[in-house]
Image: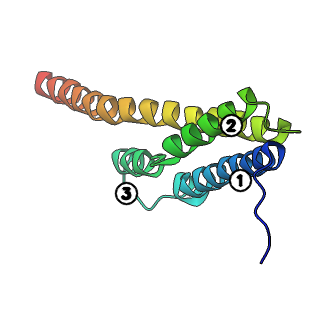
Amino acid sequence: MSQSTFDDDDLFGEAAAETRAEVEEHLTAAREQLPDPDAVWETDADNVLGVLNGLKSALDVGDAVDSVRSAKKAYVLGERADAFDDADDLKAEIEELEALVGDIEAAAEEVASLTGTVPAIRGALQDATAEEEGEE
């Protein structure tokens, strides 16, 4: 039977490794929860509104935001505890995913705005055309 060690340095090393693994797990989960690139690019809609609705659905980041947030929390904890020997890769990956999720969310908001605007423009154009035809 092996003897358990309760040495502070050993325990800290284990905790640091576990914290790094936790960050990496959350980052992997975030990447898996990102929208499918093909779903964002391809469409089978018959009109612009269908395209916009499909794109709005495709741009749903789901739980990726929560996973990036969890990764960042674990990273900050490990960094402040000075637990990482070299965590530049984790920091860069977190920043990259934060930016990507932010861009996707911004695009989704723009698409949502267009989803409301385009039908209104179409209706106004139809009204303008009907008025012009009525005058002739």
Count the numbered circles shown: 3
- Judge by depth and name the residue closer to the eye, 104 or 65: 65
Tell me what residue is drawn at x 77 percent, y 41 percent.
Answer: 90
> Which amino acid does the dot numbered 3 rest on?
Asp
| Other residues around mark 1 within 10 Å, as few (<14) / some (14–19) / many (≥20) | some
Where is the C terminus found, in terms of image quarters?
Answer: top left
| Other residues around mark 3 within 10 Å, as few (<14) / some (14–19) / many (≥20) | few
Which is more N-terminal, label 3 or label 2?
3
Which numbered disc covers residue 54?
A: none
Displayed quadrant of residue 73: top right
Q: Nearer the viewer, mark 2 or mark 3?
A: 2
| Other residues around mark 2 within 10 Å, as few (<14) / some (14–19) / many (≥20) | many
> From what the image shows, is residue 90 above or below residue 134?
below
User: What is the residue that sits farthest to the bottom in this orientation?
Assistant: 1
* Alpha carbon distance from label 1 to label 2: 10 Å
Q: Nearer the viewer, mark 1 or mark 3?
A: 1
Q: Are marks 1 and 2 in contact (CB under 8 Å)?
A: no
Tell me what residue is drawn at x 73 percent, y 30 percent.
Answer: 81
> Which amino acid does the dot numbered 2 rest on?
Tyr
**Mark 1 highlights which residue?**
21
**Mark 3 highlights which residue?**
46
> Which amino acid does the dot numbered 1 rest on?
Ala
Which is more N-terminal, label 2 or label 1?
1
Which is more N-terminal, label 3 or label 1?
1
Which numbered disc covers residue 75?
A: 2
> From what the image shows, is residue 79 above or below residue 13?
above
Please provide percent x and percent y for residue 60.
Answer: 45, 47
